[in-house]
Amino acid sequence: MAKNQKSYKEAIGEIEAILEKIENQELDVDELAENVKKVSALIKICKDKLHKTETDVQKILDSIKE
C-alpha cells in the first residue's frame, strides 16, 4: 500500500506506536531520526485527509443551503 493510500486510522495508529517507542526510550539514535521522519510523513497524510474531508463536508453543507 502506497503511503498516500493509508487510511487515517492506520496513519494515526502508526504515529501512536512510534510515539510510544519514543516515550519508552526503545529507539536508538539512528532509529529515532528515521522514525521522526516517518511520523512527519504520516502527519502530513493525516492533515491532507482532514483538509479534504473538511472541504467535502463544506461542499455538502453549501449544497443543502441552496
Image: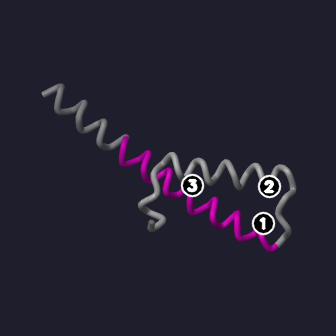
Residue 34 in the magenta stretch? The answer is: yes
Residue furthest bottom in the image: 30
Q: Classify mark 1: helix, strand or loop.
A: helix
Q: Classify mark 3: helix, strand or loop.
A: helix
Q: Nearer the viewer, mark 1 or mark 3?
A: 1
Residue visible at 25% across and 30% down? Answer: 61
Q: Residue 29, position in %: x, y?
A: 84, 70
Quarter in which the N terminus is drawn: bottom left
Query: Could you classify mark 1 by the number of other residues whose Cα lies within 10 Å: few (under 14), some (14-19), or many (20 or more)?
Result: some
Question: Residue 53 has which mark?
Answer: none
Kindly report the secondary structure that dominates the magenta region of the rendered protein. helix
| Left or right position of 65 against 27 | left
Residue visible at 57% across and 48% down? Answer: 12
Given residues 44 and 4, the one toward you in this image is 4
What's under tag 2, amino acid-wise?
Answer: Ile
Q: CA distance from mark 1 to mark 3?
A: 16 Å
Identify the residue under disc 1.
32
| Disc nearer the start of the sequence (1/3) | 1
Query: Could you classify mark 3 by the number of other residues whose Cα lies within 10 Å: few (under 14), some (14-19), or many (20 or more)?
Result: some
User: Circles 2 and 1: CB distance less than 8 Å?
Assistant: yes
What's under tag 3, amino acid-wise?
Answer: Ile
Identify the residue under disc 3.
43
| Disc nearer the start of the sequence (3/2) | 2
What's under tag 1, amino acid-wise?
Answer: Leu
Residue 31's place in the image compared with 17, above or below, is: below
Identify the residue under disc 2.
22
Q: CA distance from mark 2 to mark 1?
A: 7 Å
Q: Residue 5, position in %: x, y?
A: 42, 60
Given residues 65 and 10, the one toward you in this image is 10
- The total number of labels drawn is 3
Q: Residue 10, position in %: x, y?
A: 53, 51
